[in-house]
Image: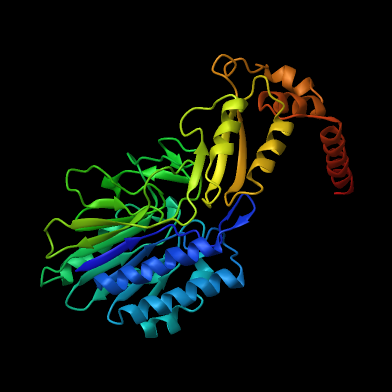
Amino acid sequence: MKILHTGDWHLGHILAGYDRTDEHQQMLNQMVTIVSRHEPDVFLLCGDVYHTSQPSAAVQTLFNNTLIRLHDACPKMTIIVTAGNHDSGSKHEIFRTPWEYLNVHMIGTLNKDDLSSHIICIPNKGYVIAIPYTHERNLQDGLLQGLIDEVLAHNVDNLPVVLSAHTTIAGADFAGHEKSDEKVIGGIDAMSVSQIGSGYDYLALGHIHHAQFIHTGKHNVRYAGSPLPVSFDENYEHSVTLVEIDRHGESPVCQTITIDNPRPLTTLPATEAAPWDEVRELLNNFPDDLPNYIRVNVLSNSINPAEARQEALQICQHKQCRFCVFNVVKPDTERHEQTQLTVQEFQQMQPIEVARLYAKDMSIPFDKDMQALFEQTLQALTLDEDQA
């Protein structure tokens, strides 16, 4: 069985106010080309089809048209799409029945009343157990193992068995994900591979954007990663994974296929933050004809962030690049000098004092206009509380 494993498309993502439809369209065009060239038996999209649970009609149309193009590129291919934590699981299944006429299986929610509906048989090729994102409390002990055992009981021809899931697996490299730690990423608690169960030949994962194997000694647990970066910190290659499994019990053979990004996300400087004079020179020297998104990391000392940010915008105004983020970074000597408050001191502070202190720690200018806006917002909130 040959599987094209992908996930985390995040269609509809807006980056610093810039619409990314053209990039997503070019990425999807590459998907269709890859399918046409390799003719997989299964196209497996492991969650986070959209960036938001309320995608626009145009974004949904883009996705639906792509499914039809994928089908036309390889009519015998089975397409399996599971919902991720960014998707609406219930909306994912609205047109589940008509899609099946094109051999497209839309799996949005965990069907506890009929768990066997998550088992998709690929005639004479193998089995896919398709699990959408679901809270861990819904995955009772033994649920996944029970599905695997059910497949194995019917698998008299020793066909390959693939399990797909959209979740966090402990031990993964979370590079590029904000507010992550070793236990939680993107609001999903990490689970160990052993909790999944055993008996599958390949575990196809979605949710983590860095393509990687999870080290289990079997080389059969993999995140395909996102085909396009969602944040500037995803400074690694993006791809899809082509997986081939001959028979049940044999190791999968995996090949990564790089997805070309028409608008790379570039950080200046590439490593550590630098003084504004150096960053300004890097911006001035950035090629006029490159369409990259740009983030700059500037040391906070000896600059006026508002003036420097405006100057950066002016430099990029006549270039093809898109200026996105002006990131002010404290020098190492200042990063551990943030104000420490006791709970009692914090409770005695006025809201405006808390806001001013936060702005100082974050190197954000808190001028008269910012203060007036804060006080206006605070008054509106107070009025709402009085009327409640």
Position of residue 118 relative to residue 184, above or below, is below
Q: Is residue 4 left or right of residue 111?
A: left
- Residue 134 seen in the current view: yes
Nearer to us in this view, 280 or 110: 280
Q: Is residue 381 left or right of residue 114?
A: right
Q: How is the image coloured?
A: rainbow
Q: Position of residue 380 (x, y in %)?
A: 87, 44
Nearer to us in this view, 250 or 70: 70
Q: Position of residue 351 (x, y in %)?
A: 80, 29
Quadrant location of the N terminus? bottom left
Residue at horizontal 52 percent and vertical 45 percent from the top: 287
Residue at horizontal 50 percent and vertical 43 percent from the top: 266
Nearer to us in this view, 336 or 25: 25
Residue at horizontal 16 percent and vertical 63 percent from the top: 245
Q: Position of residue 152 (x, y in %)?
A: 17, 65
Position of residue 91 relative to residue 335, above or below, is below
- Residue 40 seen in the current view: no
Position of residue 225 relative to residue 72, above or below, is above
Position of residue 56 relative to residue 229, above or below, is below
Q: Position of residue 186 (x, y in %)?
A: 49, 46
Find residue 57 and report its image quarter: bottom right
Q: Is residue 16 left or right of residue 146?
A: right
Q: How many marks?
A: 0
